[in-house]
Every structure is written in C-alpha cells, then in structure tokens.
Image: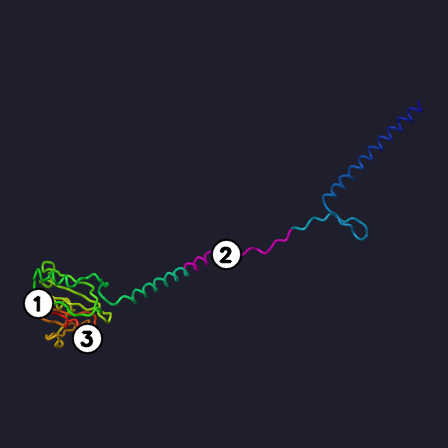
C-alpha cells in the first residue's frame, strides 16, 4: 500500500510538472510569433532591441493646381486679338482694292444698249458718252421714267463710271425741272464759273456745304449734269465725250 501510494504521488507530481511546463512554453510560442511578425534588431551588447515598425513611404512635393479662371481670361483675350487681326486684314484688302465708288464695277453693264432703248421710247433728246478709253469702267446704267421720279418731275437717264484715277463720275440727264435736278444731284450747288468743253458752254457749279463740283448743260429741253467724286479734269473729260 505504501508502495502504491508512493507511485500515485509520483505520478501526480509528474502531471503537475508537465502542466506547468505547458503553461510556461505557451507564452514563449506567442512571443516567438510576435517576434516574427515585427522585425527586431540585435544591439552591440548582444541584446535584442524592441520591434521596429517600418517607416512610412516618403511623399513627393504637392502637384500645383492650375488657376483656371486666369487661364480662361487669357485665352479669351488671345482669341479676340486673333479675330481682330483677321478682320482688319480682310478690311484692308477690300478697302485697298476697291475704288471709292457708289457701286461695284460691273463689266456686264451695256451702256450702249441702255441708250438705244431710251432713243426708241424717245422721252427726250439724250447725249451718249463716246470715245472713252477702256480705263473708264461702267458701274451702272439705267433709265427711270417720269412716272417713277416725282421729285424732279421728269424721266432720268443715268450712267456711272470708275474713272482712270480710281474715283467715280456720272452723267445724269432729265427733261424735268433743272433746279430740282441740280439740288438733288449736286447737293444744292450754285454757279461759280463757265467752261468751254467739247464745243459747248457748260456751267461750273459747286456745293457750298459739301464742296461737291459739277458741270451743268441745258440743251434742247434736256438738262445734263456731270458730277461725282472725281477731280475736275476727269469730269471735263467725261463731259467732252457726250455726243
């Protein structure tokens, strides 16, 4: 009995020792797993330092943010400037190439045909420009009957030219009121001189308000006025061509 009791006590002590070892070993395993999860460093004295957490990744400089408001205004100003240059360029080309006339040059204008038609209807005697050089480019030619023109009170025959000097000159003829014709066509011009042109005596008239000049001829019930923005030399050349 004593022998059996001694064995029982020994077994109990052995179990208790084993249990204590298990309790001691388990914390060591947990520490070992924690050491593997967090890297440690070995110091110069042989001791193990505390786990070191990895340093966060360095961030680069912040990306600059564009100020959209200023860019929009700048782009708008540049666009408007470019459009303005294009418009000025087009205007310069048109103004440089086009003479100072009341209408565009129309090569298809048939002055002779208009005069032939007027002679057929024979509202009044007319004088036609003849012998002008090709530098005189006709821009318009038309006849307006008296029923249409109520201001002058008669029919009106008109022909306009671009002159060799690049200006404008025209001839207008009517069987209506002479004073109304001068007031309408030469801006209320008054008589300033006389001139012998093409074997006829013409009245030289000039507007005091605008300075516009004209040549006036009354013959066989027809009032003829030569005027325009051309100088007096070209106006006289056009008057001399009337036959």
Residue plotted at (50% across, 56% down): 66
Residue topped by disc 3: 233
Residue 32: % across, % down? 76, 41
Q: Quadrant of residue 121?
A: bottom left
Residue plotted at (87% across, 28% down): 11
Q: Is residue 121 above or below residue 210?
A: above
Q: Name the image colouring.
A: rainbow
The span from disc 3 to disc 1 (Cα, nearest Å) is 24 Å
Residue topped by disc 1: 222
Magenta stretch: give its range: 57-76
Q: Nearer the viewer, residue 72 or 23?
A: 72
Residue 196, labelled with which disc? none
Residue 220: % across, % down? 6, 69
User: Taking 116 as reference, is 3 left or right?
Assistant: right
Residue 66, labelled with which disc? 2
Tag 2, which secondary structure?
Answer: loop
Residue 86: % across, % down? 36, 62
Q: Nearer the viewer, residue 238 or 48?
A: 238
* Residue sticking out furthest to the top: 1
Residue plotted at (72% across, 49% down): 52
Q: Quadrant of residue 5?
A: top right
- Indicate which disc, 3 or 2, sits on the residue closer to the N terminus: 2
- Indicate which disc, 3 or 1, sits on the residue closer to the N terminus: 1
Cβ atoms at labels 3 and 1 below 8 Å apart:
no
Quadrant the C terminus occupies: bottom left
Q: Is residue 63 magenta?
A: yes
């Amino acid at each position: 009995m004593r022998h059996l009791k001694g064995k029982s006590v020994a077994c109990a002590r052995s179990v208790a020792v084993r249990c204590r070892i298990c309790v001691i070993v388990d914390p060591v395993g947990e520490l070992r797993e924690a050491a593997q999860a967090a890297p440690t460093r070995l110091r110069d004295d042989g001791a193990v330092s505390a786990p070191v957490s990895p340093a966060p990744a360095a961030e680069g400089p912040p990306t600059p943010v564009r100020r959209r408001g200023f860019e929009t205004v700048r782009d708008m100003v540049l666009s408007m400037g470019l459009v303005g240059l294009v418009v000025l360029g087009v205007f310069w080309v048109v103004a440089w190439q086009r003479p100072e006339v009341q209408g565009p040059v129309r090569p298809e204008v048939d002055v002779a045909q208009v005069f032939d038609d007027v002679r057929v209807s024979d509202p009044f005697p007319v004088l036609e420009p003849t012998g002008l050089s090709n530098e005189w480019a006709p821009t318009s030619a038309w006849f307006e009957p008296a029923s249409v023109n109520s201001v002058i009170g008669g029919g009106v025959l008109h022909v306009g030219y671009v002159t060799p000097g690049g200006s404008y000159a025209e001839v207008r003829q009517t069987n209506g009121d002479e004073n109304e014709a001068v007031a309408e066509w030469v801006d209320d011009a008054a008589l300033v001189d006389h001139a012998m042109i093409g074997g006829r005596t013409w009245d030289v008239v000039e507007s005091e308000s605008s300075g516009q000049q004209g040549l006036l001829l009354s013959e066989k019930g027809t009032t003829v006025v030569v005027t325009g923005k051309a100088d007096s030399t070209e106006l006289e050349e056009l008057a001399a061509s009337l036959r």
